[in-house]
Every structure is written in C-alpha cells, then in structure tokens.
Image (cartoon, grey):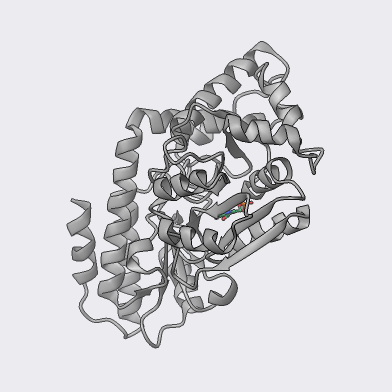
C-alpha cells in the first residue's frame, strides 16, 4: 500500500500539527477560551486576506461563503455582472439569480479571464450594473484574473460593489483585498490555507457593510447582521465547528511562520515546475498563458491518452490523487492542485509518477526529461 499524496484542487494534505490540533477538547462557544480562539483566527485571516476589514467565519464549505455574499450584499434590484469562466462562475450566477437579482452573464470563453480592458468594454454596454461578482481563480479551467488590482480600480470608478470568490487561491497567491478594493472577499479552509474542509471566510468592507443594511437578508442562517452582532463579542451566531477552528488556527500559524511572501513563492515555483514538466510530457493547457493559475493546473493529456484512465492509474499505481474535468471538460482533462503545504517532494513525486505512467503506457520515452524540466524551476 502506497501512502496517498493529495494533489487535488482541494482538499489538500494536512500536516500533523494541524491534524493534532483537532484532538483538543471541545469547549463552550460562549466562553472566554473560545473568544481567544476566535480572535486568533480572525487576526490570522486578516493577515492572509491582507485586509483591515472584518472577516466573518462560517461553519460551511466555500459555497456557504458564496451564499452569504449573495444573500446579504446583493438585493433584488441589483444588476450583477458575472464573468463566466467555467463551472464555479456559472454556479455563482445561479446563486445570484435565485436571489432574484438580474444577472448579466458575460461568457469569456474557455481558458480566458477578465482584464480591466474587458471590464470597461462590458460596462460600456451595461451602464446600469451595480455589482461585479468575480471568481478570481476558476477551478474548473485553471485560470486566474491576475490583474485583480486594476479590475478593482475599474469596478470602483464605476461605483460597483466588488465581490470576489478566491476560494481556490487565497493563501496561495497574492490577492490583496484592500489594495484591490474588494468589498466582499470569499475564501475556503480546505484549499491553499491547508485546513480541513468545512469552513469558509468572508472579508467585508465598510461599504459592503453599509449596503447590507439596505438589503433585505435572503437567509436566516447566513444573516449578516447576526454575524456582525456576534462578532463584536468574538462569537458566531450559531454553534461553530470548534475542532475545525483549532485546526485552522494552527494552519494560519504555519502561514505566518513561513511568511506570506514565501508561501506565494513556494506555490509559484511548484506551479511553474508542474507546467514545465507537463509540457515536456506532451500535455497542453486549458488556460491561455497570461491567465494560467498557480494553484490549479487544468491540462489535456497527450494524444491517445484517456484522462479518466490517467487519473485512475496515477492513484492506483502511484498513490498520487489528482482530479478530473468538470462540466464541458469532464473526461477531457486532468486537474492538479498546487495548494497549501505543496512542496518540492510533492511536485517531484507527482512528476516522476506521471512520467513513469506515461512511459508504461508506451506514449513517452524520454524518462527523466520531465523531472529535469521541473527541477529547473524548483531549485
Ligand atoms: C472557485 C470555487 N468556488 C466555490 C467552490 C465551492 O466550494 P465548496 O466545495 O467548499 O463548497 C469551489 C470548490 O472547489 C471553488 O473552487
């Protein structure tokens, strides 16, 4: 039995420190001890979000964070621009239309993402838009809106509320909430932050807080005013997943110890190494080069190789767990997560496993070339 290596676009490998933290006794979520835990986690999240805004902690997976944003900061009279980059942007659009707001879906095309110029163009056609709701890193296609700071500037020049889902990127790449003027910024626990699945976080600007006051809340469980009231005493309105918060506190400490800049560099090096190795092996990428994600790599296998088989055999023979395609890319691609505690060891194991597998399938001969290509970026 080979020990599994999770190279999924979430959930990611959890270090022992994080796992051990979950075995601490459960405490009262209305007591002093919990207040310290809440404050420590809140401070750690502010660091990762790069914000002075309030950060709210939800016992819900990432989608819960999206629902929180949609049901508190978007009203029925809003016109919301949603750039469609793949499955997760489409889900966001669905959540917004269920809220009863008008959704302006802008199909950007496979492998593409938003630029400030494209946003200007969209806004020329939709002068009455009031919200921009963007998935920063589209996990189904492996594209990132790298020019987020300029995009935020354009959104603000046009008076838009700026909502960003960074669930599959925050804590792995630089998405400075305050600099990019993001009003409502959503992240999840199980991706680059390297905590267990089950928590989501939403950083909310004072502008968004004001807007929440003018909008009829669409949800009881995710009512912003309750979260705000309880946060003022370092609590959550409902029973939080305390063991997950212990784990989160530990993973946030690990990010602080390493330093955000170093965390970003480690993700970037690992992603570059994987892109180089996969190119050498004959893969091609869904993302256009300027939008390539550094946390999720979405790649078409070399000619004649079945994506399902590749994914299945990589796991059964080498213990490396990756993901397949979603939506229109189901069965056509593989997706590799570059998240959380991703290391040189994890990247080299993934590359050499892929190289060996393709060699054994008779579609690749130059054993060692892909690993060498990866190492050039890792060292
Ligand atoms: C960009 C993005 N948004 C939303 C979600 C939904 O998160 P969850 O599955 O934690 O609810 C994901 C999950 O992969 C995601 O990648």
Residue 49 relative to residue 261: left or right:
right
Residue 345 vs residue 45, the one in the foreground: 45
Residue 68 relative to residue 86: left or right:
right
Residue 277 vs residue 123, the one in the foreground: 123
Could you tell me residue 99's position as x and y percent?
Answer: 77, 52
Q: Residue at x 63, y 16 (%)?
A: 35
Could you tell me residue 296's position as x and y percent?
Answer: 43, 59
Residue 346 relative to residue 53: left or right:
left
Image: 100 above or below 48: below
Could you tell me residue 302's position as x and y percent?
Answer: 36, 81
Q: Residue at x 57, y 76 (%)?
A: 328
Would residue 117 be seen by someone viewing this image from the given angle?
yes
As drawn, the residue found furthest toward the bottom would be 304
Q: Residue at x 34, y 76 (%)?
A: 283
Q: Splitting the image into 4 quarters, where does residue 276 fall? A: bottom left
Q: Residue at x 58, y 52 (%)?
A: 133
Image: 19 above or below 95: above
Would residue 244 be seen by someone viewing this image from the given angle?
no
């Amino acid at each position: 039995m080979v020990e599994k290596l999770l190279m999924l676009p979430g959930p990611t490998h959890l270090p022992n420190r994080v796992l051990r933290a979950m075995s601490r006794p459960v405490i009262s979520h209305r007591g002093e001890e919990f207040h310290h835990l809440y404050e420590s986690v809140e401070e750690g999240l502010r660091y990762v979000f790069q914000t002075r805004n309030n950060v709210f902690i939800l016992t819900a997976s990432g989608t819960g964070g999206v629902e929180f944003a949609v049901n508190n900061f978007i009203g029925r009279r809003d016109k919301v621009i949603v750039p469609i980059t793949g499955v997760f942007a489409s889900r966001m659009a669905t959540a917004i239309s269920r809220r009863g707001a008008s959704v302006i879906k802008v199909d950007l095309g496979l492998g593409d993402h938003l630029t400030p110029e494209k946003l200007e163009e969209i806004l020329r056609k939709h002068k009455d838009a009031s919200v921009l709701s963007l998935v920063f890193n589209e996990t189904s296609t492996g594209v990132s809106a790298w020019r987020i700071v300029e995009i935020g500037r354009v959104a603000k020049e046009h008076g838009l509320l700026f909502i960003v889902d960074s669930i599959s990127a925050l804590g792995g790449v630089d998405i400075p909430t305050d600099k990019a003027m993001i009003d409502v910024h959503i992240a999840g626990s199980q991706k680059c932050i390297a905590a267990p699945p089950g928590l989501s976080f939403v950083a909310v600007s004072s502008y968004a807080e004001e807007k929440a006051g003018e909008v009829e809340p669409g949800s009881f469980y995710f009512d912003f005013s309750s979260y705000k009231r309880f946060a003022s005493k370092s609590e959550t309105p409902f029973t939080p997943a305390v063991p997950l918060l212990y784990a989160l506190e530990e993973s946030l400490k690990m990010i602080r110890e390493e330093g955000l800049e170093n965390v970003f560099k480690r993700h970037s090096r690992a992603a570059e190494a994987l892109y180089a190795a996969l190119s050498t092996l004959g893969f091609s990428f869904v993302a256009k080069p300027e939008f390539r994600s550094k946390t999720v790599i979405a790649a078409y296998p070399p000619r004649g190789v079945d994506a399902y088989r590749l994914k299945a055999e990589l796991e059964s023979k080498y213990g490396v767990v990756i993901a397949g395609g979603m939506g229109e890319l189901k069965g056509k691609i593989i997706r590799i997560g570059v998240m959380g505690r991703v290391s040189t060891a994890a990247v080299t194991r993934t590359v050499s496993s892929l190289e060996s597998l393709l060699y054994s399938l008779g579609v690749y001969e130059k054993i060692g070339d892909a690993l060498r290509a990866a190492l050039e970026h890792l060292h």
